[in-house]
Structure formats: structure tokens, C-alpha cells
Image (cartoon, rainbow, N blue to C red):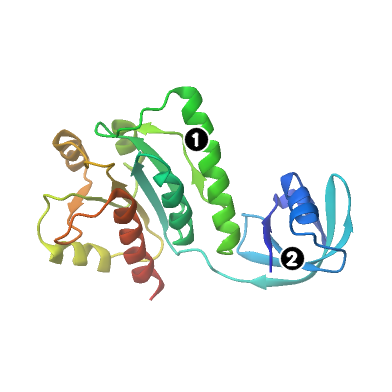
Amino acid sequence: MHHFFVEPSQIWGNEVRITGSDVRHIKNVLRMKAGEELSVSNGADQKEYRCGIEKLGEEEILCRIRFIKEADVELPSKVYLFQGLPKGDKMELIVQKAVELGVYEIIPVAARRAVVKLDEKKAKHKRERWQGIAEAAAKQSRRKAVPAVKPVMAMDEAISYASEMDIRLIPYEMAEGMEKTKEMISSLHPGQTIAVFIGPEGGFEESEIEAARNAGICPITMGKRILRTETAGLTILAWIMYQLET
């Protein structure tokens, strides 16, 4: 079943009015007809609204709610991924898979070793692209809300942004002791806010790790092998998902 996101104001009584780019997608791409069923979420609750299409207009699609499914599919903790800007289109893959794994928010970080340098115009365009990928991934994985992709931050800004979060982790190739990593992951529990910092190709500079450590962010190892930036974040997100949902 196809899934879409609407604003709470688009649900009134037992009616749902779908507007914007989804109208063209439903009519011209999916070629859906009156009487067919779809589902919507509004990002404000954990409900999935199963609807039947009643009328396909030029500017909006009118649907009638058939039943409401209470489904708690979101992680019980908010997980923030602070991702060092990678080369090429790797960020698109990272955003897509991070959303599937339940991340709450993605913060691109312009770390010192990041090869990619974005000016304001390029950063805005990239962010819009990444946010679109996040929305598509949220629809595909039947999330009840679309994770936000924040504006690109410098490392010091990212450290400050994470300062009030309960658990803050930064995988680092020079960290030792997988037991410490296991202890940190196994100690996670619902209701916490969790920050994960992932470096770009080449990792974080020592000075960035030191700044993170001084701010209370805990360096951890991810094992004996060096993981690519697009692998590291998804690996630790999978660990967190496993811990929180068991």
C-alpha cells in the first residue's frame, strides 16, 4: 500500500485532503483511481490513517478515512546522526538507510578532513535533495514522521548542538576496547536522546576528537576493521535499533 505524509490540518473529521507534489505522483505516476486505498500519517501522532480515494482533483485529492491503525513504529529514543560530509553521492545512501533504521534527525557536519566543501547555495540545494530522499525513505519504511535533515554545521557547532543529549558517541579508529562499546550500547534505554558522530573519509582530526572528548562525547571502537564512512554510521544505528527494540 502506498503511504503519504500530510499536515495535521489536512485531516478533518473523517476526510483527508492530499495536496502538493503528491497529487501529481498519485494521479500520473501511480495512476491510482477513486475507490483505491492508501495510507497517510501526519507526523504528529503514531497513527496510520487508512483511506479510500473519493475524488482526484487538479490541486488536491480527497480521501475518506476507513479506519485508523495505532502503530508505534518509531524508535523509543531519538537518535541524531552527525555525519561528516562524504564524497560524491554517498550522503544520499546514508540518508536513505539511516531513515529506514529509525534515525530521528540527520546533521551534516563539515569536518576538517571532509573533501566536500559546500558554499551556501550548494549547501541549500544539497539539503533540499537530502530532505526529499528522507521523505521518500520514510514513506517506503512506513515511518510516522519524516526525519529532518538539518543545515550543514561546523564541528564546533555540532558539538554544541549535541551538548544536551543524554548519550553521545563518536566512533574513532584509535579507541580501544570493544567491551566498552558493548557496555555503552547495552546501557541504552527508551526515552534517551542519542547522538552519534561519524567522520568523513579519513576520519576526524585528533583535535576534533579531543574537542568532542572535552565536551563529554565518548570515543568508542567499532571493532578491528576500519569501516567506510557510509558503513560506520549505518552499523552503529543498526546496533542501537537492535538494543532499543529487543
Image marks 2 and 1: residues in contact by CB distance under 8 Å:
no
Image location of residue 8, percent across then percent down: 71, 52
Give the total of numbered labels.
Answer: 2
Viewer-closest of 36 and 170: 36
Disc 2 crowd, CA 10 A, few/some/many (<14, 14-19, 20+):
some
Q: CA distance from mark 2 to mark 1?
A: 30 Å
- Image quadrant assignment for residue 52: bottom right
Q: Is residue 144 visible?
A: no
Image location of residue 226, percent across then percent down: 19, 54
Tell me what residue is drawn at x 25 percent, y 31 percent: 112
Image location of residue 137, percent across then percent down: 54, 56
Element assignment for label 1: helix
Viewer-closest of 207 and 190: 207
Specify whether 114 is left or right of 150: left
Can you identify the residue that label 1 sits on? Answer: 126
Image quadrant holding the N terminus, namely bottom right
Disc 1 crowd, CA 10 A, few/some/many (<14, 14-19, 20+):
some
Q: Is residue 115 visible?
A: yes
Which mark lies nearer to you, 2 or 1? Answer: 1
Can you identify the residue that label 2 sits on? Answer: 38
- Amino acid type, residue under disc 1 in the picture: Lys
Specify whether 127 is left or right of 239: right
Specify whether 18 is left or right of 70: right
Viewer-closest of 97 and 73: 97
Which residue is at the far bottom? 246
- Amino acid type, residue under disc 2 in the picture: Leu
Element assignment for label 2: strand
